[in-house]
Amino acid sequence: MMRILFLVVTWCLVVFPKLSHAQDVQRLPDPLLFNNGKKVKSAKDWERRRQEIRETMTREMYGAAPQQPKNMRFEVFDLDKNALGGKATRKQVTIHITEKGRQAKFDLLIYIPNQAKQPVPAIIGLNFIGNQAIHPDPGIKLTTAWVENSRMFPCGADGRATDACRGVNASQWAVDSILARGYALVTLYREEVASDRKAQAFQTGIHPLYPELQQREDNFGTIAAWAWALSRGLDYLETDRDIDAKRVAVFGFSRLGKAALWAGATDRRFAAVLSNESGAGGGKQFRRGVGEDINRLCTAFPHWFARNFAHYRGKDSELPFDQHFVLSLIAPRPVYLATAEDDKNSDPQGEFATARAADAVYRFLGTNGFPDGAFPPLNQPLMGQIGFHIRPGGHDVKMFDWIQILNFSDLHLQK
Ligand code: GCU
């Protein structure tokens, strides 16, 4: 009797939790299985499967962005070899795009470290408040696009950037550290590319250049537009002799982290992806059901994704993919997910789960993937081909985040 009882208890304690864990894992779509259920067995298979994943995610979620424009011009309108007290060369470049007679433009702000051996690797990322907000440097052009004017970002009246807006977002951009570590920093303003205000969405920036794409149910949303603009930034960097365009990492925080991940997924020229608290529609898994869900995303930010995505409101578990598929598209290139303890909306555990689930693809492609083990303690980064950390505090980009991001970049991008 006692033996039977012992066996039953053992089964409950040992076997049952394993079975239910296996079911959990099973519920997550497998990037290494084709839609028809066949297994990916070779590198050639993976290329086909990768294409399948890209098509599905484009159609159902992010939307179909335009091809690389044929008519694009780079205007370097500023060059200061003695910027930031001599530490850097500052360049500012307008990217002009013409499509069937319609025009759009947005600016890149570039700092290149003067002390480093050139060409240098670079980190490119979108910013929230305009290029002039990332550093008080008076040489940075004030954006002419709309800027928010809030207590956090006191930028000036009527949505126009004034000198008051210089450096208001500097705490999130570790410009000195980035340059000291030998990286160029390249940034562009989200609002110049595609408006993030609900009422203005799709009406400014690059969207009006492509009205036919806007008619479709897989119309490219604002996140895909931002990702597309990051690729245009890289188009410019490929022409700049001071930059090693083969070593450009794409960075982003929060909604701009979602854009960075999608840019890395869709443009294999990015050598690495650095995402900071990208959360829902970025690094976190929808199926865990923790933090922001699809319904909330589509209500608060209906312009971020294709119209098709709204079909999944309240049906997060019915997506034919989850966000580890984005990491799979980036594989085998290095990707870093920075998270923060109090950023519950972004669900740090959900970002960890994504890294874990993408590990199989990274290993299949011959890298060391994501380091084995449990969810790490605070401030203890995991550094594999996939990297991850959780730090104390809330939704922000802190110096701690930058230090890990730079350490991770050094591992993968410095020669
Ligand atoms: C909101 C949104 C998030 C997003 C964040 C940000 O909180 O719900 O998805 O990441 O804004 O961009 O700061």
Image (cartoon, helix red, strand yellow):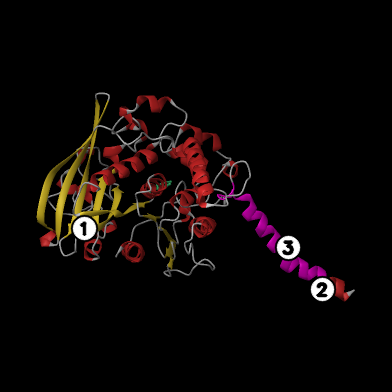
Residue at 53% x, 45% y is 49
Percent position of residue 266, x then y: 40, 44
Percent position of residue 202, x then y: 35, 31
- Magenta run includes residue 8: yes
Q: Main SS type for the magenta part?
A: helix
Real-space Cα separation, disc 3 to disc 2, in angstroms: 15 Å
Labelled disc at residue 43: none
In the rendered view, tell whether residue 283 sits above or below residue 407.
Answer: above
Labelled disc at residue 16: 3
Residue at 76% x, 66% y is 12
Percent position of residue 264, x then y: 39, 49
Mark 1 lies on a secondary structure that is loop
Q: Is residue 102 left or right of residue 88?
A: right
User: Within the image, what quadrant is residue 21 found in?
Assistant: bottom right
Q: Label 1 sits on what residue type?
A: Pro
| 1 and 2 marks in contact (CB < 8 Å) | no
For label 1, the residue is 119
Is label 1 or label 2 in front? 1
Mark with earlier residue (3, 2)? 2
Q: Is residue 322 left or right of residue 411?
A: right
Residues drawn in magenta: 7-33
